[in-house]
Amino acid sequence: MGAQTSSAAGGVMAKATVVGPIILLGPPGAGKGTQAKLIAERYGIPQISTGDLLRDNVARKTDLGLKARAIMDRGDLVPDELVCDMVAFRLQLADCAKGFILDGFPRTVRQAGWLDGYLETMRAGKDAAARAACAPPVVIRLEVEYNKLLQRIVGRRSCPTCGRIYNVYFQPPNVEGICDLDGGPLVSRRDDSEDVVTERLKTYERQTLPLVDYYRAKGRLVEIDGDLPVEEVAAQTFRAIESVRLAQ
C-alpha cells in the first residue's frame, strides 16, 4: 500500500498512504490521548473526539447540537442515535479521506455495531482508496495495571499559569507543590481525587470492557502494554497499524 520508508519504529508508512480507521481502547489514565496525537502526527489523519464533536455542535447551534443541548438541559444523557449522527457527519469530511482516529467512541458494543455497519455502507461502490479509508478499524487496547492507573491520575498536578503537568510519583517538580518554570503553586483537578477516579474506572469496566470481547472475537484487537515508555508504546502501536493495513 503506497510508498514506505524504514525507521527504528518498524517501518514508516508515508503520509499519503491510506491507513483507515483506528480505535484506541483503554481506561482513564492509560495514555490514549498521548498516543492519539502521535498517531495523528505520523500518518496525517485527524483525531476525532466525541466530546469535542458534541461541544462543537452545541456551540455552532447545528440541528444536532440544538437537539443535544435540549437533552442535556434536562439533565439527561445524549442518546446513542444523536452521537452516532454527529460521528457520521464528521467522517464524511475531506480530512478523513486517508483514515481517522476515534477518541471516546465507540464506548459500548451497541455503538461498535453501528460503526461497523456504517463503515460497511461507506465501502459500498467506492474505489480502492476510499474502501481502505473506511475499512474495518484497527483496535489498539492499552493495558495498564490498576494501581498504576490510580497513581497516574491521582498524582497529576498542573500549573495554572504555564500549563505544565507533573506527577508526584513519576515526574515530580523540583520543589514540592511548586512549578519548576514560573514558581507558581501547582493544583490538582477535582475529578482527579481517588474517590472520583475509582468510580470512573468502575464505569469504564462496566461499559467499555465488553468492547474488548467484541473486537477480539472479530480478530481486530491488538493489546499493548501501556505501562512501557511512551516511545515504545508508540512504536508498538505503529507496527500494529502498519502490519494490519499492509496485510489487507
Image (tube, grey):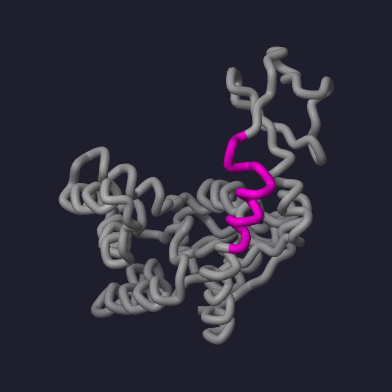
Residue 109 versus residue 37 in the image, above or below:
below
Residue 118 position in % (x across, y down): 31, 74
**Can the viewer see residue 112?**
yes
Residue 38 versus residue 183 in the image, above or below:
below
Residue 40 position in % (x across, y down): 51, 50
Verify whether residue 155 appears in magenta. Answer: no
Q: Main secondary structure of the magenta part?
A: helix
Q: Which residues are magenta?
A: 189-202
- Mark count: 0
**Can the viewer see residue 91?**
no
Q: Quadrant of residue 216?
A: bottom right
Q: Residue at x 42, y 74 (%)?
A: 112
Q: Residue at x 47, y 61 (%)?
A: 17
Q: Nearer the viewer, residue 199 or 181?
A: 199
Q: Residue at x 28, y 54 (%)?
A: 93
Q: Residue at x 43, y 58 (%)?
A: 100
Relative side of 180 to 120, left or right: right
Q: Nearer the viewer, residue 64 or 17?
A: 64
Residue 214 position in % (x across, y down): 52, 81
Verify whether residue 199 appears in magenta. Answer: yes
Q: Quadrant of residue 153?
A: top right
Relative side of 30 to 122, left or right: right
Q: Quadrant of residue 202?
A: bottom right
Q: Nearer the viewer, residue 6 or 144?
A: 144
Residue 55 position in % (x across, y down): 33, 43
Residue 233 versus residue 219 in the image, above or below:
above
Q: Residue furthest left?
A: 63
Residue 203 versus residue 196 in the image, above or below:
below
